[in-house]
């Protein structure tokens, strides 16, 4: 039987690339999205993985910053594919890009709730299912999307950096707690990746950004999907942070 993977924020950019990678690896897929503008994108991914990889896919709207929505998302996954959940990819994330004097409380609370609390909610709800059927020979995986912002400071991104650093702490702690139960927990910390946000940047500014990267170019979403693929097929890897970033941050 095909294994099951849930991905939050799986409809665009890095999330889309990781959703497609999961389908390619043969996972039945639960794709979470939040805004109505992302529904068509999620539906397209679901149809693509069904057609190209022969897996099944379910698209679920949920605001994963809210525990109740996370409960509904997990219930929908279990109702569709059963209670043997093999992979959770926590990928939902937002940013404010605001200085710390002008930022509003509601703004930074939204970032923390979306970027960090959703990861706590989803792991809290998924781990009981994983504990019931995972072991050394049938491993399960949790993969958390952090950022180089969780490894270094970034101007006008204090709340974002705090959330992404928190994800790394969560990853390492859960990896230790569940290592003996066949559950591996790792994080991916992307550097500058070409997504819709960067495509809208002035080309001269884009060249300047690329010039700050030791390798001299901005990464592609496929670099992050590739890291996900490696993590899922590396049975001796847990508690680690993989950072495809072109050398801009060295761990």
Image (spheres, rainbow, N blue to C red):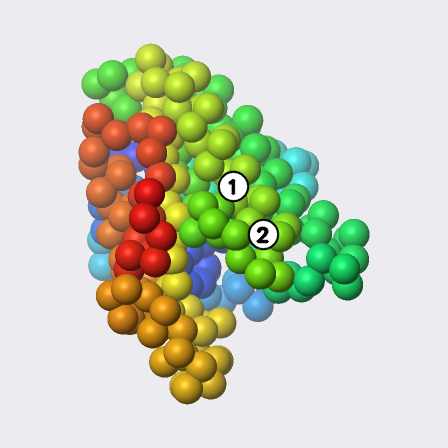
Which of the marked residues, 2 or 1, is nearer the chain's N terminus? Answer: 2
The image shows residue 23 at horizontal and vertical percentages of 28, 50
Q: Which residue is mark 2?
A: 160
Instruction: Say few, some or many: other residues with alpha carbon within 10 Å of mark 1 (under 14 / 14 to 19 / 20 or more).
Output: many
Above or below: residue 232 compared with residue 115 = above
| Element at label 1 | helix
Label 2 crowd (10 A; few <14 / some 14-19 / many >=20) = many
Residue at 36% of width from left, 52% of height from top?
249
Residue shown at 33%/43% (left/top)? 251
Q: Position of residue 150 (x, y in %)?
A: 48, 46
Q: Nearer the viewer, residue 11 or 244?
A: 244
Picture layout, residue 238 above or below residue 26: above
Q: Which residue is mark 1?
A: 165
Q: Position of residue 242 (x, y in %)?
A: 31, 43
Q: Is residue 29 visible?
A: no
106, above or below 71, in the image: below
Residue 135 in which image quadrant: top left
**What residue occupies the far top of the structure in this picture?**
180
Please identify the quarter of the rendering in which residue 65 is found. Answer: top right
Residue at disc 2, secondary structure: helix
Question: Is residue 63 toward the left or the right of residue 184 in the image?
Answer: right
On the image, the x and y values in percent for residue 160 come to 58, 52
Picture quadrant where residue 30 is located: top left
Kindly tell me whether residue 111 is visible in this rendering.
yes
């Amino acid at each position: 039987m095909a294994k099951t993977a849930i991905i939050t924020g799986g409809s665009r950019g890095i999330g889309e690339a990781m959703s497609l990678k999961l389908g390619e690896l043969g996972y039945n897929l639960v794709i979470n999205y939040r805004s109505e503008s992302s529904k068509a994108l999620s539906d397209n991914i679901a149809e693509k993985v069904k057609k190209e990889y022969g897996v099944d896919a379910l698209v679920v709207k949920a605001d994963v910053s809210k525990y109740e929505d996370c409960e509904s998302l997990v219930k929908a996954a279990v109702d569709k594919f059963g209670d043997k959940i093999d992979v959770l990819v926590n990928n939902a994330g937002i940013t404010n890009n605001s200085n710390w004097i002008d930022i509003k409380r509601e703004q930074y609370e939204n970032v923390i709730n979306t970027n960090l609390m959703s990861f706590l909610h989803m792991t809290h709800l998924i781990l009981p299912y994983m504990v019931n059927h995972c072991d050394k020979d049938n491993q399960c995986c949790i993969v958390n999307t952090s950022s180089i912002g969780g490894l270094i400071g970034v101007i006008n991104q204090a709340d974002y950096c705090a959330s992404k650093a928190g994800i790394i702490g969560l990853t390492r702690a859960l990896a230790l707690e569940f290592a003996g139960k066949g559950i591996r927990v790792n994080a991916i910390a992307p550097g500058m990746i070409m997504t819709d946000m960067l495509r809208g940047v002035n080309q001269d500014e884009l060249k300047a950004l690329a010039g700050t990267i030791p390798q001299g170019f901005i990464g592609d979403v496929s670099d992050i999907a590739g890291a996900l693929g490696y993590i899922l097929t590396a049975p001796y890897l847990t508690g680690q942070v993989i950072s495809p970033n072109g050398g801009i941050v060295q761990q």
